[in-house]
Image: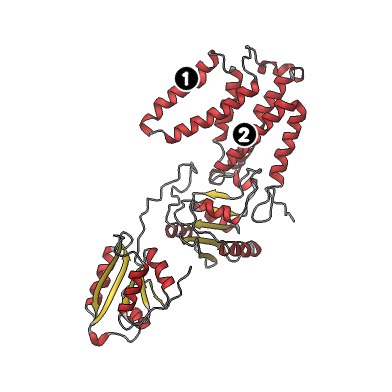
Amino acid sequence: MADKTKVFSKRDKNVDYMNQMLPVEDSFDIVQRDIQIGGKDATFYFIDGFTKDESMLKIMDSFFNIKEGDMPKDAAAFATTCIPYVEVDVIGDFDQIFRNLLSGVTCLFIDGYQACLAIDCRTYPARSVDEPDKDKSLRGSRDGFVETIVFNTALMRRRIRDRHLVMKMLEVGESSRTDVALCYMEDRVDQELLKNLNYRIRDIKVDDLRMNQQSLAECLFKRKWYNPFPKFKFTERPDTAAACLLEGKVVILVDNSPSAMILPTSILDIIEEANDYYFPTLTGMYLKISRALITFLTIFLTPVFLLFMQNLSWLPKIFAFVAVKDTVNIPLIFQLLMLEVAIDGLRLAALNTPSMLSTPLSVIAGLVMGEFSVKSGWFNAEVMLYMAFVAVANYTQPNFELGYALKFMRLELLVLTAVFNWIGFLAGTVIVICSICFNKTLSGRSYLNIRLN
């Protein structure tokens, strides 16, 4: 609940209230510092680790030089004439004081002033703005978003020096009070979408955003569990986010998350990547067409192979070489399903393996999943080949969620084809098409950018 208690004019009352509401004695990082400024008692509150020591030393040095006769009559005048710093606010209620203090802002109470002086000389721990591992580009900038929201907004502001660029700061979560930045070009954005987003974010009633951006996405749009296609586009590249802003889209940043959420989106937006724009038009078009073709094969290659193996008479003579020649000890459908799970197991193993052991893991996995698994009779060589292509093709998708959505569509096609033969294959294809066409997103548009009522 918001604390609307007003600041007292007496410093002692303010200090007593702050110490009552905050675990100052129990928490080592909440620091209380009592000093005298111009003959008046004053108290600082700040979070250890969030405050710039050099800035605070200079500010306190200037306070010690203030004489009793130079003290202004109110807090607003003191902030204007006596604090040699840029970001200073005068706060009148404790709810705002607690929010600022726990965000890293230094709060100052002076006896006789019925207000708190909030000095924003905080600094957050942050890593360098290196290029993201997942969203790399062969050409172009090498910086990427980090976990600090102010750094991320600065990376986009550096690229767009336009007075119409708006970055509105909102707050979500009763306990976490997570900062959320709504970024848009005021003269290009869809005003209806912007109004809808503003309303939805302000209307969120949750205790905290545990998983940062993912928690916000789930609060904004209650997805249907049976449609796995992603509703949002995510990027860790500031140049991609800036380009989307200039196209009239909305970018949402969440503090502690090193990526940006982009709206509205479509299937064409999600399969795009930065390399498509850093190369000449012909090269970019070739990359887009190649990625679209690989995406198509990712879904249909193994189901089509299974369909033809169940109906060998349909196989044209020119493609007779694709038929399985060796003895099939385990039905093809079970081989394909086992390899689907095995590939995910290898991916998880690689993710959790220390870097010094990654090479031995790769060698063991290559031997076991390759030659030995075929010789042992568990898998046929043709099945291993096609599943190897599918495993590699999944990494051509810049969006991780889309890769798994395609995997689920492929599994559904495999199972239906194995059970109902060609009827199941046609039914599965219809399900894939409908899942894409009728995947309604937050903007009210489907993946094909068709307005849905």
Q: Position of residue 208 (x, y in %)?
A: 49, 57
Q: Is residue 445 visible?
A: yes
Q: How is the image coloured?
A: secondary structure
Say whether residue 121 is left or right of residue 446. left
Figure quadrant of residue 30 = bottom left
Say whether residue 230 is left or right of residue 316. left
Seen in the picture, residue 5 relative to 188 is either above or below; the reply is below
Toward the viewer: 324 or 92?
A: 92
Seen in the picture, residue 166 relative to 362 is either above or below; the reply is below
* Mark earlier in primary sequence (2, 1): 2
Figure quadrant of residue 315 = top right
Seen in the picture, residue 295 relative to 90 is either above or below; the reply is above
Q: Residues within 10 Å of mark 2 (few under 14, many from 20)?
A: some
Q: Secondary structure at mark 2?
A: helix
Q: Amino acid at mark 2?
A: Ile
Q: Amino acid at mark 1?
A: Leu
Q: Position of residue 94 (x, y in %)?
A: 41, 73
C-alpha distance separating marks 2 and 1: 26 Å
Q: Position of residue 352 (x, y in %)?
A: 43, 35
In the image, which disc is placed on residue 170?
Answer: none
Which residue position is annotated with label 2?
Answer: 294
Figure quadrant of residue 295 = top right
Which residue position is annotated with label 1?
Answer: 367
Residue at (45% x, 32% y) in the render: 350
